[in-house]
Amino acid sequence: KAGVTQTPRYLIKTRGQQVTLSCSPISGHRSVSWYQQTPGQGLQFLFEYFSETQRNKGNFPGRFSGRQFSNSRSEMNVSTLELGDSALYLCASSSVAGDENIQYFGAGTRLSVL
Amino acid sequence: GQSLEQPSEVTAVEGAIVQINCTYQTSGFYGLSWYQQHDGGAPTFLSYNALDGLEETGRFSSFLSRSDSYGYLLLQELQMKDSASYFCAVSRGSTLGRLYFGRGTQLTVWP
């Protein structure tokens, strides 16, 4: 079974630009969560999508948005990039079935904002 | 809100045993997970506890005490490849995709 795939792996943008990151979850997983990881703040939750609906949202400004498609693939978008948006963006999928909440992470997209 | 506390750094030598503690404050607690992340890599799932007690998976064990809001990850027979960051994470429901992560513990294993 293929793992979680995130594209692109690396991205360099300048302030004010926008960016779209993509995540393909494990086949059969309907929940996709996004996290931002920085050395200073650790892993911070951005949002979770389940069956094309945003189910949870973290404390990030409206510049951060996402969506999920009918095949469970997800995208997140960051508009009007700021220097502080430089981070590793991780996507995780889970089956949300059964008793365990195990999240499977992709390798991430490392975004650098210049 | 939710908060998880774990040590920022731990060091040990090969073959030793190390314990990484995690205390949490959260509403609606359902389970405690542990993830390992090597530099530049993706976090990978190690262990999960929903009930009090010890769960053993090879060289790794995880413990949970719900009454104390406390858990730990025990790594035995340490190897150099165990050098990584270890995160505890709380889930508030089995069907909810969101996890609340601690800041991570950097484990360094010396030869």
Image: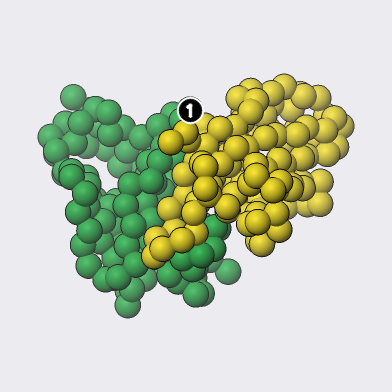
Chain colours: A yellow, B green
In the rendered image, which residue does mark 1 sit on?
B40
Badge 1 crowding class, 10 Å Cα cut-off, few under 14, some 14 to 19, many 20 or more, is few
Tell which subunit mark 1 falls on: B
- Please identify the quadrant where the N terminus of chain B is shown: bottom right
Label 1, secondary structure: give it. loop
Query: Residue A58, percent across and down?
Result: 67, 57
Q: Amino acid at mark 1?
A: Gly
Q: Residue at x 54, y 57 (%)?
A: B97
Left or right for A81, reference B66: right
Q: In the depicted view, which residue is nearer to us: A18 or B83?
A: A18
Q: In the depicted view, which residue is nearer to us: B4 or A67?
A: A67
Query: Residue B10, percent across and down?
Result: 30, 42
Q: Quadrant of residue B36?
A: top left
Q: In the depicted view, which residue is nearer to us: B2 or B59?
A: B59
Is residue B21 shown to the viewer in this render?
no
Left or right for A38, reference A79: left
Q: Compared with residue A85, is residue A7 higher up or lower down, i.e. above or below?
A: above
